[in-house]
Amino acid sequence: MDKKLFTMVDESFICEVCGKKVDKLNYPARDHCNHCLSSKHLDIFPGDRKSSCGGILEPIEIEKGSKDKYKIVYRCKKCGEIKKNKMATDDNFDKILEIMKERSFNS
């Protein structure tokens, strides 16, 4: 991805799915709830806040990327768009395993 299309937005928020407080990540930016792993469809490009959708991004899969980095794959519950976000070090590991198990069961 072109680095010019990435806008750094790292802010705390209350998750609209689980209701828990989500603190700033402090590297590089928080883009999903570390408790339930849900996100919100706010961006066209990371951090730009230009999407008019506003739907809930539901985690549907965990994808292994390069250099042992993992991404959470999302499907927007409102528009159906597929998005990917990097996993954070403080993400709920039990939820990650649950998503991986569901995906392997449904494959």
Image (cartoon, helix red, strand yellow):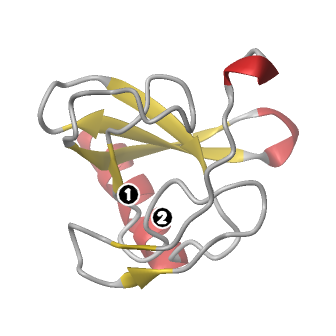
Left or right for 79, reference 19? left
Looking at the figure, which quarter contains the C terminus?
top left
Q: Looking at the picture, how far across and down is residue 43, in whole percent?
A: 43, 32
Q: Residue furthest bottom?
A: 20
Amino acid identity at mark 2: Ile
Determine which residue is flagged by label 1: 99
Determine which residue is flagged by label 2: 96
Q: Residue at x 24, y 35 (%)?
A: 76
Q: Looking at the picture, how far across and down is residue 55, in whole percent?
A: 19, 41
Residue 30 lies in quadrant: bottom right
Looking at the figure, which quarter contains the N terminus?
top right
Left or right for 48, reference 41? right
Left or right for 38, reference 54? right
Q: Which residue lies furthest to the right in this view?
A: 67
Residue closer to the observer: 6 or 39: 6
Could you classify mark 1 by the number of other residues whose Cα lies within 10 Å: few (under 14), some (14-19), or many (20 or more)? some
SS class, disc 2 = helix
Left or right for 27, reference 29? right
SS class, disc 1 = helix
Alpha-carbon distance for marks 1 and 2?
A: 5 Å
Could you classify mark 2 by the number of other residues whose Cα lies within 10 Å: few (under 14), some (14-19), or many (20 or more)? some
Q: Which residue is drawn at 37% across and 57% down?
A: 99
Q: Looking at the picture, how far across and down is residue 23, in whole percent?
A: 55, 79
Residue 32 against residue 5 in the figure, above or below: below
Q: Residue at x 69, y 45 (%)?
A: 8
Residue 40 against residue 77 in the figure, above or below: below
Q: Is there CB contact under 8 Å for labels 1 and 2?
A: yes
Residue 20 against residue 37 in the figure, above or below: below
